[in-house]
Amino acid sequence: MAASARVPTADGKDVFSMRIISASNYEGMSRKAASLLAAQVVFKRDSVLGLATGSTPLGIYRCLIDWYQQGILDFSAVHSVNLDEYCGLSPEHDQSYAYYMDSNFFRHINIQKENTHIPDGLAEDPDGEGARYDALIRSLGGTDIQLLGIGHTGHIGFNEPAPQFVKPTHRVELNRKTIEANARFFASEADVPRYAVTMGIGSIMAAKKILLAANGEGKAEILYEAFFGPITPQVPASILQLHPDVTVVADEAALQVIGEKAPEAMKGC
Ligand code: GLP
């Protein structure tokens, strides 16, 4: 079910309208989020999809692969731009996001390899790489829909809590909490890269549509803070309150705090 959250300003005007789509569990969240990406590709076969990594989107990619295999979806004209990549990991490293995207999605569908784009984690000049990546996204006509997860720190991509929002794609030092959270994918915490190249807040906000997926009670508090707390670079996802077209697809566990503290946003959900 979907509901729409409107936040009135002092003069009573709505500043944003975020849709919330609730699912009973991870599978349901995955199917609903995947169906929105699928609709985008059906409507526009040469869509530019902004893609994400992490554990959250895995079920979404499984659904899209399934629908491709059933002949429902065709990715041959699609371009993709990924949010981020660890610094220092080559695409062959099994924890690089390039490897993740290839093994969990790209190699199972008919997207053309040359149409898939991920920041270069090995770039010697991270600033130059950021500028190249933003120019590339612009040259593709911009991102039609950007899939996002959310980190426990409120990060989107790898935009960590910071004194200010950083707009362009850039190199970032990872937060301790993020390193701890991502250590589960590496042999040890010491192996987690300390830096990443991430689309900046401006690069993400330039997407025509945002689709944020979240599951599990561990995301419930940060999801509430991001969409109902103050807009602050200390909670990077809170900037999404200013985006005109945001859909949050989440399971009931992740929506628990929103349901308790902002029940009006969940009406019809
Ligand atoms: C990583 C990624 C983010 C992702 C986040 C949450 O740090 N850079 O893009 O949203 O983790 O991950 P998960 O989906 O595993 O909770």
Image (spheres, rainbow, N blue to C red):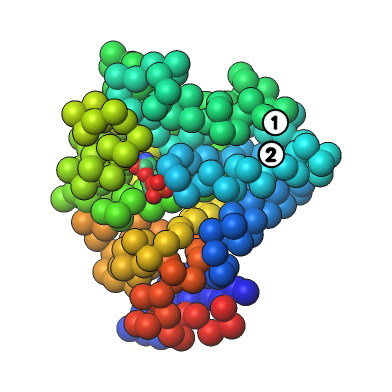
CA–CA distance in space, label 2 to label 1: 6 Å
Looking at the rendering, in which quadrant would you find the N terminus?
Answer: bottom right
**Mark 1 burial class by Cα count in 10 Å: few <14, some 14-19, many 20+:** many
- View extreme (right): residue: 71
In front of the other: 74 or 179: 179
The reply, left or right, for residue 166 in relation to residue 204 is: left
Which quarter holds ligand 1? top left
Relative vertical location of residue 161 with respect to residue 226 in this rendering, above or below:
above
Does the CB distance between marks 2 and 1 fall below 8 Å? Answer: yes
Find residue 237 and report its image quarter. bottom left
The reply, left or right, for residue 29 in relation to residue 13 is: right
* x then y, percent, for residue 61: 60, 42
Total labels drawn: 2
Looking at the rendering, in which quadrant would you find the C terminus?
Answer: bottom right
In front of the other: 265 or 170: 265
Residue at left offset 52%, top offset 46%: 57
Residue at left offset 48%, top offset 76%: 5
**According to the image, label 1 marks what residue?**
109
Q: Give the mark nearer the N terminus: 2 vs 1.
A: 2
Query: Helix, strand, or loop for circle 2?
Result: helix
Residue at left offset 48%, top offset 41%: 52
Residue at left offset 68%, top offset 54%: 35
The disc label shown at residue 71, or none: none
The disc label shown at residue 65, or none: 2
In front of the other: 138 or 253: 253
**Mark 2 burial class by Cα count in 10 Å: few <14, some 14-19, many 20+:** many
The answer to whether residue 260 is visible is: yes
Name the amino acid type tagged 1.
Answer: Ile
Relative vertical location of residue 95 with respect to residue 15 in this rendering, above or below:
above
* x then y, percent, for residue 163: 16, 50
